[in-house]
Amino acid sequence: MRILITGAAGFLGSHLCDHLLKDGHEVIGMDNFVTGSPDNIAHLADNDNFSFYRRDVSEYIFVPGKVDAILHFASPASPNPQSKSGYFNLPIQTMKAGALGTHNCLGLARAQNARFLLASTSEIYGDPEVHPQVETYTGNVDPIGTRAVYDEAKRFAESLTMAYHRSHNVNTSIVRIFNTYGPRLDLEDGRALPNMIKQALLGQPLTVYGDGSQTRSFCYVDDLIDGIVKLLYSEEHFPVNMGNPHERTILQFAETINKVTGNTAGITYVDARSARDPQRRRPDITRAQTILNWEPKVSLEEGLLRSIPYFKQKLGLA
Amino acid sequence: MRILITGAAGFLGSHLCDHLLKDGHEVIGMDNFVTGSPDNIAHLADNDNFSFYRRDVSEYIFVPGKVDAILHFASPASPNPQSKSGYFNLPIQTMKAGALGTHNCLGLARAQNARFLLASTSEIYGDPEVHPQVETYTGNVDPIGTRAVYDEAKRFAESLTMAYHRSHNVNTSIVRIFNTYGPRLDLEDGRALPNMIKQALLGQPLTVYGDGSQTRSFCYVDDLIDGIVKLLYSEEHFPVNMGNPHERTILQFAETINKVTGNTAGITYVDARSARDPQRRRPDITRAQTILNWEPKVSLEEGLLRSIPYFKQKLGLA
């Protein structure tokens, strides 16, 4: 297949490029480098099956030649208010990537009779009141909250995707991605896991907000990419949750990270953040298991061991 | 003020034109007549303070000269699956009016330093689990449901409006409009009230789905328009519910309509619709009362009496 990937220079987009090239496809990457990094795709420069367009998908998405599949992964995704490339600091760009970008992708998918895959997110569930989250849960998102620029953009993108499927019979699919980690994850991403990995590698005590009893589930990137590619190859149209259903407390994550990295600086407890971070988030992956025969296989310890060389290099420690 | 109204040929848009012209403003109407009707603004043709552009607001919104305020009312809004101009039959146009149309309006408002008012809807609450609905309720909308083309478009429009306010300091406002009736309401709109009014005027028994115990609240259009104009003139930025908090059962509506119209054909009970119509919907209007000193004043009986001449004319009975 000839596959267009928007957000190709991002964390997930770049791993998708690698995987699909390895599967023998021709890959067209697209990114405007607002949140993605050229470093993430530099290794593909000499690959004859890879081409790249620097372009804002909210503006224009046309590429010459036949396209068989489009994976729309372009969007700011970091919830870190301090991050320049997080959606709090790029609110309108985030909404445009979700609405105008998705609209452009669906138009191209329709014109090319191509399979379309939307990168959606667990954030469409907002601050969930149902645990674990199943695909039929309608979520708890405040449309006028500051997080809504990401959450509502993705909800809109899902609705538009289904509208193109129902009205124009476009062959669409939607993956709702839960927390993921691995090489190329931005250490300034703002989520608990990269924060703590960075601190551990620098020999600092890990910051835990509150008492550390809030829970998270993190999926190793290779597992997630396997699932997304299975979804791409399938005929499924309705949303599929993908993430690691193994829920742990933040304190358990901290202890595992200190153990795996050999960090002896321990843990510092600080006041719970004022930011309305969800207290719990865990995917119900029954649909992915049933439809795609997919579930994560890489343990947290193994995933951390595989990620550490990249993070060390990024921190100038390797 | 020089005021641009999108959806000017619609039910609410045309009443807004009338009211704002009466208040001494210059009004620029815009509509593509996909759901609006030239009949609704025909009486304004000779008004020197009124001008009109036939245009799709999702495509292009620029108008020459200074604009002091923009009211974005363009969107399909009828939930009637049988209606050609309902959002079930215009799913992608509906999403474009909410996303691209709102984006165009906000861009113009920013460039012109104009007040912006978004017509949002009680539909952003979906099938509500909180009664009555307060503005802080986050709603119950399924992003991949068939109703989502309207609901998610409006939620996205609200998020984008707040993003422009927060990021670019645009002077924005949002009204969440609940069920409204009055002259120029499309009798094929699909909602219970126009359906029953039509049947009563034709001397037919009124159709009541299920046992008629589901409730609705309907606001007379003059009341609603008064509230919207008060919001326009205010400095409020956060969403304000507007509608009639007087909740009645569908059966009570049916009996009142039969009484006011002198219809003696009674009521026919049929099976509850399969469509996922909300069982209850009622605005909490405390914010509008507090901030704008607004509440509806026209009784159902009075509103029906004022509406009937229009509906009779439409049905060829006058």
Image (cartoon, coloured by chain):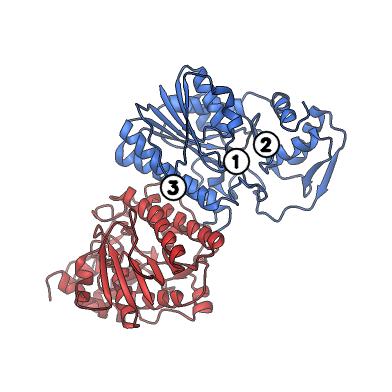
Chain colours: A red, B blue
Q: Residue at x 40, y 21 (%)?
A: B1
Q: CA distance from mark 1 to mark 2?
A: 10 Å
Which amino acid, mark 2? Glu
Q: CA distance from mark 3 to mark 2?
A: 32 Å
Check if mark 1's residue and mark 2's residue have beta carbons within 8 Å.
yes
Classify mark 1: helix, strand or loop.
loop
Examine the image and state in which quarter residue B78 appears. top right
Q: Position of residue B239 (x, y in %)?
A: 46, 37
Chain label for disc 1: B
Q: Quadrant of residue B123?
A: top right
Mark positioned earlier in the residue sequence (1 or 2)? 1
Instruction: Please identify, in this view, whether the residue under mark 1 or under mark 3 is nearer the observer.
Output: 3
Count of numbered marks: 3
Query: Can residue A144 be seen from the camera position used here?
Result: no
User: Which one is earlier in the sequence, the residue at label 3 or at label 2?
Assistant: 3
Callout 2 crowding tier (Cα within 10 Å): few <14, some 14–19, many ≥20: some
Q: Is B76 above or below relative to A214?
A: above
Residue at mark 2: B247
Chain holding disc 2: B
User: From the viewer's perspective, is B174 left or right of B216?
Assistant: left
Q: Nearer the viewer, mark 3 or mark 2?
A: 3
Identify which residue, A181 or A164, lies in the foreground: A164
The numbered mark at residue B99 is: 3
